[in-house]
Amino acid sequence: MPKKVVLAYSGGLDTSVILKWLIEEYGYEVIAFAADLGQGAGELDGLEEKAVNTGAAKVIVRDLRRVFLEEYVFPMLRAGAVYEGKYMLGTSIARPLIARAMVQVALGEGAEAVAHGATGKGNDQVRFELTVKALAPQLKIIAPWRIWAIRSRHDALEYAAQHRIPVPVTAEKPYSMDRNLWHISYEGGILEDPAQEPPEEMFLLTRSPREAPAEPEVIEISFEKGVPVGLNGESLEPVQLLTRLNEIGGKHALGRTDIVENRLVGMKSRGVYETPGGTLLYFAHRELEHLTIDRETLHYKEAVALKYAEIIYNGTWYSSLRRALDAFIANTQEKVTGEVKLKLYKGNISLVARKSPFSLYHPELATFEADDLYDQKDAGGFINLYGLPLQVDGMLRQTWKDEVEKEN
């Protein structure tokens, strides 16, 4: 009986060729696995038939959209994780879920190995393989792009023709694309020149500011313990909520990012991203945190957010450090509950209002009018004690200056 391998399968050229190659090279029984993370209409259509026609013994497609948001995206949002100040980690955060699901399929089907189509230059190979090592270290990992003779798209097309692999005959996009509920990423091809402006027709989720509505729109997002739960007073489940926010944000030209980022493998790469709904959520969530989290915790959480982003980007989602940071973040989010009202207009977000039953903002303390809670005389003593190290340093420097002048 042939041994089994689970392949992360998309139906495109690369994974179609890999499917056949695994059969030809290893004699494997290939189980093609695909995760529905909200790639959009059409991307999963006909996938099972295509895989079977290429030689797959079995095809498994799982709808993981809600799990993706609840267990991966929303924890990332609560952490405030953004990589290098711009990238909202839409591809990075999807990989540990896809790989976890592959491991579950492999163990359930009695497979000895898993395989993926990530290249040897990218970050995804690390994210997939570290997940497997963390969850099922006994599984063999096969990464064809690191070991086979195929080196280019031309080589892959030749292999497909020789083995009669049903590959759709379409014009190649001048860039690669990855899509899920949270974002779309674009890289490679014409985008490899950082001086080249992305073509407007490339964008699928967002309008340009020129094409955005002439009138602003005001929306209100509701949160419970840092998790988004509603829009404009209506409670919504995660997939529905993010779908609506993507539509609204995209309509108002929000969520485009162009970054030259530092890959884990050591090189810089240029990525262009669309994250309209995520942009709205991050903005609103941050404003609510400012209202409900004390100064020292908020400032320390900013450092945690940077580390959390690195963990996601570098593929160590299943590390003990991430679990420990989750415990800290969960504590910070206990009172991040309330509503944030935003005004959207031609690529800009303006804060209109925010409110929370746990607000730390006290009008009587902040007022410039007379109040009974804050005695301004106390500030003098506070400044004297807080500034004492500076005062002592200044006295020493003055003494040193006087001594130098005496010698001269």
Image: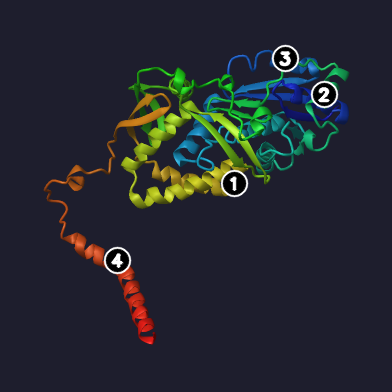
Q: Earlier in the sequence, mark 1 or mark 4?
A: 1
Q: Is residue 348 above or below residue 290?
A: above
Residue position marked by numbered label 4 in the rendering? 387
> In this view of the protein, can residue 137 be seen by the observer?
yes
Q: CA distance from mark 2 to mark 1?
A: 34 Å
Mark 1 or 3: in front is 3
Q: Tell me the SS state at disc 1.
A: loop
Q: Amino acid at mark 4?
A: Gly
Query: Where residue 27 sits: x, y (%)?
Result: 87, 28
Residue that label 3 marks: 170
Tag 2 residue: 20
Q: Residue extending furthest bottom?
A: 407
Which amino acid type is marked by label 2?
Lys
Is residue 336 visible to the viewer in this orientation of the structure? Answer: no
Q: Classify mark 3: helix, strand or loop.
A: loop
Q: Could you say which quadrant of the image residue 281 lies in?
A: top left
The quarter of the image holding the C terminus is: bottom left
N-term mark: 4 or 2 = 2
- Colour mapping: rainbow
Q: Is residue 164 above or below residue 194?
A: above
The amino acid type, in three-letter code, at marker 3 is Thr
Q: Earlier in the sequence, mark 3 or mark 2?
A: 2
State the residue position of label 1: 319
Q: Position of residue 15 (x, y in %)?
A: 75, 25
Mark 3 or mark 2: which is in front?
A: 3
**Label 1 close to label 4 by CB (< 8 Å):** no
Cβ atoms at labels 3 and 4 below 8 Å apart: no
What residue is shown at x 44% (from left), y 47% (from top)? 302
User: In x, y percent, where is residue 111?
Assistant: 76, 31
